[in-house]
Amino acid sequence: MIKGLYEAHLPVKNLLVSIEFYKSLGLEIAFQNETLVFFWIEKGRSWLGLWETDKVETPYHPSLRHVAFQVESEEIHKVKEWLEEKGIPIRTAFGFSPEHQPLVLPNFPHAHGAIYFHDPDGNSLELITPLKIDAKERFEMMSLTEWTTT
């Protein structure tokens, strides 16, 4: 069964700018040439390919320009501060503004914690973790803060 991300590919305008951005997220370069870089997500198991191209301005669709990176459930409370320390702005997602993230995504009977942001080329990125709960009834999406206080 799936235990992580094997690979994802994203278009980027400036490979050097994107390399610095993804290195700031803690990813390590696996391979690089003049117009392509692969970053290890989990060394030896999964990677992200960034392709420098002038065709970055294509219409956005999450199936083409979205990558979710799994984080530990204990870390989801810290990811907002971690991104802010790196100067990476959190984006509005599902109608929830940055100040109301991370979110709790109800995938009944479980839930996931997630926070959303963009890379320098507008590709949608997400940090996500399964939350260790067993919901007895369906609930609406809410902020993690709201969820922990109810």
Image (cartoon, helix red, strand yellow):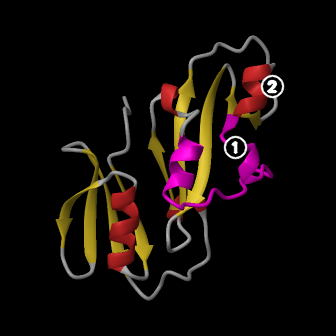
Q: Which residue is tagged 2?
A: 139
For label 2, the crowd category at 10 Å Cα-Cα, with few meaning under 14, some 14 to 19 and many 20 or more, is some
Q: Is mark 1 on a helix, strand or loop?
A: loop
Q: Which of marks 1 and 2 is nearer the N terminus?
A: 1
Q: Is mark 2 on a helix, strand or loop?
A: loop
Question: Does residue 132 sit above or below 84 in this rendering?
Answer: above
Identify the residue at the far front of this view.
Answer: 85
The three-letter code of the residue at mark 2 reads: Phe
What residue is drawn where x is 51% and y is 46%?
82
Label 1 to label 2: alpha-carbon separation: 17 Å
Q: Is residue 86 magenta?
A: yes
Question: Does residue 54 sit above or below 39 in this rendering?
Answer: below
Mark number, residue 101? 1
> Over which residues does the magenta segment extend?
79-104
Q: Are marks 1 and 2 in contact (CB under 8 Å)?
A: no
Quarter of the image where one finds residue 134: top right
Mark number, residue 66? none
For label 1, the crowd category at 10 Å Cα-Cα, with few meaning under 14, some 14 to 19 and many 20 or more, is many
Q: Which x, y percent locates residue 95?
A: 80, 52
- The residue nearer to you, when weighing 76 against 111, is 76
What residue is drawn where x is 57% and y is 45%?
81
Q: Which x, y percent locates residue 96?
A: 78, 49
Quarter of the image where one finds residue 105: top right
Q: Is residue 8 magenta?
A: no
